[in-house]
Image: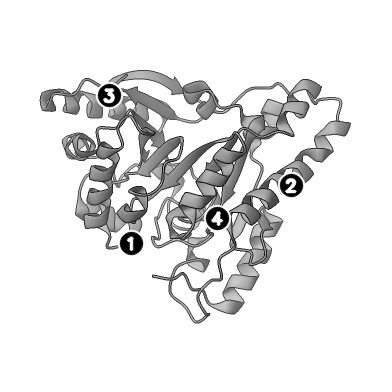
Amino acid sequence: MEPRATLNYYKETLKTLEKQGYHFVGTHKHSAVKTCLWLRRSIRGEGNCYKGKFYGISAHRCIQMTPSIFCNQSCVHCWRPLEAFNIVGEVEPVIWDAPDEIVEDCIKEQNRLISGFKGSDKTNMDAFAEATVPKNAAISLIGEPTLYPHLKGLIQEFHSRDMTTFVVTNGTNPGVLREIRPYQLYISLNAPDEATYKKASHAQYWPRINESLEEMRKLKGRTRRVIRITCIEGLNMINPAGYAELLERANPDFIEVKAYMHIGYSRKRLSREAMPTHLRVKDFAREIAEALTPLGYTYTITDESEISRVVLISSL
C-alpha cells in the first residue's frame, strides 16, 4: 500500500520533528537524518553505543537515517510520532526520491550537523576527522524502511561508497527481504504470539512477520541476521517458549533482548512502569535462551550493555 498522510497533520508534525533534531533530506522530504547522543559522546572520546560494543560500529562514523518516515504499524512502545505517519489519509501517494539523491544528501547533512564539533575543546580531533567520512548507515531512524520502494538500490548506493548498512524492519514486507542484502538485517519481534502482537502493534500483519522469519533463515551466510525483542513490562515479557518457536524459524546469528525505554511519544501510551530493569531483561533473555535448547539450538548470553538495558544472545 502506498503511504499517505493527512496534509495538515503531516506538515505540523514535520515542524515538530525538525524541532526535535530531525533533518529532512531529498526533494520530497520523506527521508531524514538525525545525530544521536552516542555520536556526540563518541566524537568526544566519551564512549560508544552498544552497537559498537556488540558489532564494532563506531558511533561517530554512523549515519542514523531513514528513507521512509511512514509506518504501517502503531506500536505502543515506539518513541516516534507514528500517529502522524500511518499509511491512511487524504494526500496523494508519496513521490519517492532516487537512492543516490538520498545518500548524497544524508552524507552532506551529517557533515553539516557535526561541523560545530570542530570548534569545541571537548572534541577529539582524530575522531572528528573520521566522522567526516562515515562508514555505516543505520537505516532505522523513524518509520518502516521497507515501505521505500527502492531500498535495494539505497543499500547498494551506500555500499558503493565503502559503507556498511544496518536495516531495521518490522518484518511486514517479506518480499523486500528477499531482495535486499544489507550488511546486517534486524527484524523487530515484539510478541510471542498473534494476540500479543496485535496488542503491541495495533496491526494485522502476523502471517507476514512469520514469513519474514522464514526469509531470514534463508539468508544465513549471506548477511548478518539479528532478531530484536523490545521488552515491555506487563505486555510482552511472557511465554519464552513462544519466542523460542519463532526464533527457531529465523535461526538468527544474534538476538537482542532490550528494554522498552520510556521516552518520546511512547509516554503518551505507556507508563514508566512498563520499562523493565536491566536485571529483569537479562533474566528474560536467559529464559529465552534456555527455551531454545530443547529445540536443538545453542544460544548463550555473550554480551550486555547495562546503560542501554540490552542483552546480546549469540549462536556464534
Sort mark 3 into few (<14), some (14-19) or many (20+) by Cα contacts within 10 Å.
some
Tell me the residue at 58%/35% (across/down).
163
Sort mark 1 into few (<14), some (14-19) or many (20+) by Cα contacts within 10 Å.
some
Q: Which quarter of the figure is the C terminus placed in?
A: top left
Which of pointers 2 and 3 lies earlier in the amino acid sequence?
2
Asked whether, in this view, residue 94 is left or right of residue 248, the answer is right
Amino acid on which the number 1 mark rests in the picture = His
Amino acid on which the number 3 mark rests in the picture = Arg
For label 4, the SS is: loop
Which of pointers 1 and 2 lies earlier in the amino acid sequence?
2
Which of pointers 2 and 4 lies earlier in the amino acid sequence?
4
Q: Which residue is mark 2?
A: 108
For label 3, the SS is: helix
Amino acid on which the number 4 mark rests in the picture = Pro
For discs 1 and 2, the disc positioned in front in the rendered view: 2
Q: Which residue is mark 1?
A: 202
Relative to 87, is 180 above or below?
above
Q: Which residue is mark 4?
A: 67
Relative to 79, is 259 above or below?
above
- Is there CB contact under 8 Å for labels 2 and 3? no
